[in-house]
Structure formats: C-alpha cells, structure tokens
Amino acid sequence: MANDMQVGISTSADIVTARQRGRELASELGFSGSDLTVLATAISEVARNIIEHAKEGEVILEPTHNGSKQGILIIASDRGPGIPDVDRALQDGYSSGKGLGLGLPGAKRLMDEFKVVSEVGKGTTVTMKKWVR
C-alpha cells in the first residue's frame, strides 16, 4: 500500500471506500481491535459531512509520527459552503442539516487530535490524528 492515499468523496460508496482504506492503513501501522472501528467511524462521519454539506470533496489518509509515536493522519476537505460557526458546529446536538448533530463532535471525541478550519463560501478542512497505543 502506498504511504498515503486520496479518496474522492461524492457518493455513499466513496464513504465505504474511505473507511476500508483507512482501516487497511491503520492495521498496517499497528492499530488493532476497537481502534480500527473507532478510526472507521471517524472517517465515516467526516466523509458523510462532505456529501451532506458540500456534495463532494476528498479524504486523505497517511501515516504520521511524532518522535517514536506512530499514527494515522486523516484530512477531509471540501470546497463547499463552509461552517459559519465552527465552535457551535462542534457542540453535541447542533446540526445545520437534518442530522443529529453528532458527526463532528463525535469524530472529535474518537480522535487524539482534531482541528477544523472553515471559511464561509470556500470550504472546510478537518484534520484528525490517532496514535497507536
């Protein structure tokens, strides 16, 4: 498997592909058990947001490290409408769509590092990291 991969996101099938590729890479990096499920869930949440709010975008998956720590870096980006209030969007229960408002806050809880950068009218990038334990 390549060191990093890009998955275009525009359909539900693309979410499945991103999840599968994320699990494969994470397994190669030493993740196992429930961590693989956690990573797949977080990838699903951010990819689903791309489809729901921006219609299309991409998910990039790549190994990362910090000293002796090894992990996975996930970057989900789109060129959609952007998020007017990122802090509010990260609160449980807030949804600008039809969802339950658990996607971004849920993904944040599942990951070790989580950052959202968004500009109205230009798009959103979610950067997440999980470290092998």
Image (tube, grey):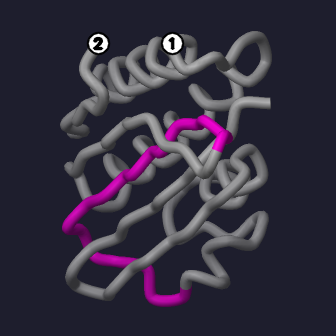
> Can you say which quadrant of the picture contains the N terminus?
top left
Which residue corresponds to mark 2?
Answer: 1
Quadrant of the rendered image containing residue 105 = bottom right
For mark 1, give the secondary structure. helix
At 48% across and 43% down in the image, what residue appears? 64
Circle 2 SS class:
loop
Query: Which part of the image, by quadrant, shows the C terminus?
Result: top right
- The image quadrant of residue 10 is top left
N-terminal of the two: label 2 or label 1? 2
Image side of residue 126 versus residue 110, left or right:
left
Which of these two is toward me, 23 or 83? Answer: 23
Q: Which residue lies furthest to the front in this view?
A: 67
Please give the count of numbered marks on the rendered protein: 2
Determine crowd level at label 2: few under 14, some 14-19, many 20+ residues with C-alpha closer than 10 A. Answer: few
Frontmost residue, 101 versus 87: 87
Three-letter code for the amino acid on which mark 1 is drawn: Glu
Q: What stretch is highlighted in magenta?
A: 68-85
As drawn, the label of residue 114 is none
Q: Mark 1 points at which residue?
A: 28
